[in-house]
Amino acid sequence: MLNREKVILMTKLAEYEQKEGRKEIPLSKYFRSDYIGLHLIGSFFAITICYILVAALYFAYKSEEYLANLVKLDLFKIGKNVLIYYIIFLVINMFIAYIVYWVKFVKIRRHLKEYNRQLKQLRRIYEKERLGEDGGDSHDDVDAGIKRKM
Amino acid sequence: MMMWMLVLKEKCKKIYNDYDVYLSAIGKFFIVFFSMYLLGEKIGYNSLFRAKPIMLIVALLASFLPFSLMTIILSIVIVAHVYTLSMEMAAVILVLMIIMFILYYRFSGKDGILLVLTSIFFFIKIPYFIPIVVGLCLAPISAVSVACGTIIYYLLSYISENAVVINNMSADTLTEKFNMIIGSLLGNNEMYLTVIAFTFVIVVVYVLKRMSVNYSWAIAVLGGGIINLVVFLVGNTVVENAVTTPTTTIVIGTMISIILAYIFEFFVFSVDYTRTEHTQFEDDEYYYYVKAVPKITVAAPEVSVKRINTRKTKKRVTPVLPEARETKEAKETKEEREAALAAREETIKQMRETAAQLEDYDESDSSIEFDDDYEE
């Protein structure tokens, strides 16, 4: 027999599992610090690549000037500036990334909690069904037996 | 009129619910085709992507792909067009796009399409529509993608304006080309102003829309339009000749954008187009193929209740209510307090007058002193 309540619940669960859940359910194993930390490592590389690209664009823009004064260039100073800007760029972007992933984690946790609640509900329905089938004969659950008779 | 529009809205909703799969595919098809057509008109240097059959094929392909891939397809089209003209320009655009993708789209790839759509709306002269709509239905963070889209548009428009010059440059002036295009980007005041204006509009529309007032979205759209005009006009006077677009174009464009935003809000954003969902799953006994159709509420005519005699009833009720009595008492005490205050002021005045007659009188100091005395 089809149980209407069960089907509705299962549909909801399946919908979540096949959409957001596909990415979010594996994250249930993570602590917040692990999740954010892992993503920050990725962010570090992304930001570094980004900075290299920005710097490349800048040097392409200034290339004529640099080529003209090639002899007089203070390479040490340029290197220092590149490093300083890199650190500033990195810190700002890492901070933004930290906040974004923190908010994301909180959101995912909320979804997972709801998912878990629905799973529990489904399990309860299953238990009720099982007890309804053979619970009357065994003495461990009187309630289920009564329910079956009703 | 209003009734008729509401009924139309419900009908739209029903049609969308019945044919959502086809409608969203058709929508994607038209967005991609129209975008490619406009890009072909404005920066159509690549004959391959200018050919109508190719446009059709790409658009058809895109209609089956998710939204995020549409952005990538259109970005490739842009880079391909520019590449045919000049490799260096294409490299700059590509690098800028990669930077935007890396920095921003890791967080939220959903509104990536704005990157291209902003340019498209610039081409059809109503870019002011974009920030208003973004403020209405997305979060302020999307201002980043609108800003990126604006930058890309100004790059493209610079390239299309100077296509002849770029074409005639010899191959060995590579650094010169870089210098030219990046310089155009850095020195473009209109671009900066546009980015600022659009960010303002997005934030203002977003904040106004979230106010708990009736018709907050209508106020938000209007407010956004006004802010847009104000920032452009003020910016144009502060930084002289920052905006090369004529003022009339901006005003008319903003007005059209506002009207379009109203229409869109009414038919698209204010309607809950919950989609029909198809899922499949199984348990120990069955396979389930579920089609979950959202419930559609029947169009209920909006009733506005006009209370004509509310004041009267209130008046009649007030003496009976204990709170009302309290307020009355409070009023009386307030009157008393006011009288006391007036008396006090008068005493201070008298004291001041006597004090003024004394020599070496410092008004500010003594007045404070008198106040303190009085209170003690």
Image (tube, coloured by chain):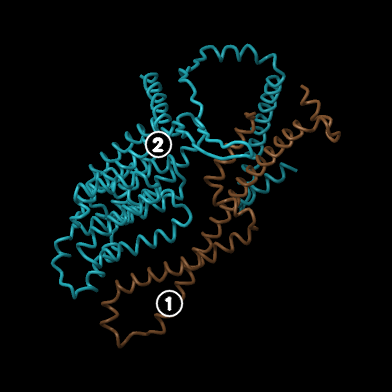
Image quarter (top left, top right, bottom left or bottom right) of the C terminus of chain B: top right
Q: Residue at (41%, 82%) from the top-left corner?
A: A77
Image quarter (top left, top right, bottom left or bottom right) of the N terminus of chain B: top left
Residues at discs 1 and 2 both on one chain: no
Within-10-Å neighbours for mark 2: few <14, some 14–19, many 20+: few
Work out whether A30 lies above or below B259.
below
What x and y, as percent, mark residue B175? 24, 74
Between circles 1 and 2, the one closer to the viewer is: 2
What x and y, as percent, mark residue B296? 48, 25
Extreme residue toward the right, this view? A139
Q: Secondary structure at mark 2?
A: helix
- Residue kind at label 2, given as amino acid type: Val
Q: Secondary structure at mark 1?
A: helix
Residue wearing tag 2: B21
Within-10-Å neighbours for mark 1: few <14, some 14–19, many 20+: few
Residue B300 shown left or right of residue B310 in the figure? left
Pick the residue in front: A121 or B365: A121
Pick the residue in front: A133 or B263: A133
Work out whether B23 lies above or below B246.
above
Chain identifier of the residue bearing label 2 in the image = B
**Chain (cyan):** B
Residue wearing tag 1: A81
Cα separation, mark 1 vs mark 2, equals 54 Å
Q: Residue at (38%, 51%) from the top-left corner?
A: B69
Q: Residue at (42%, 37%) from the top-left corner?
A: B220
Work out whether B244 lies above or below A73.
above
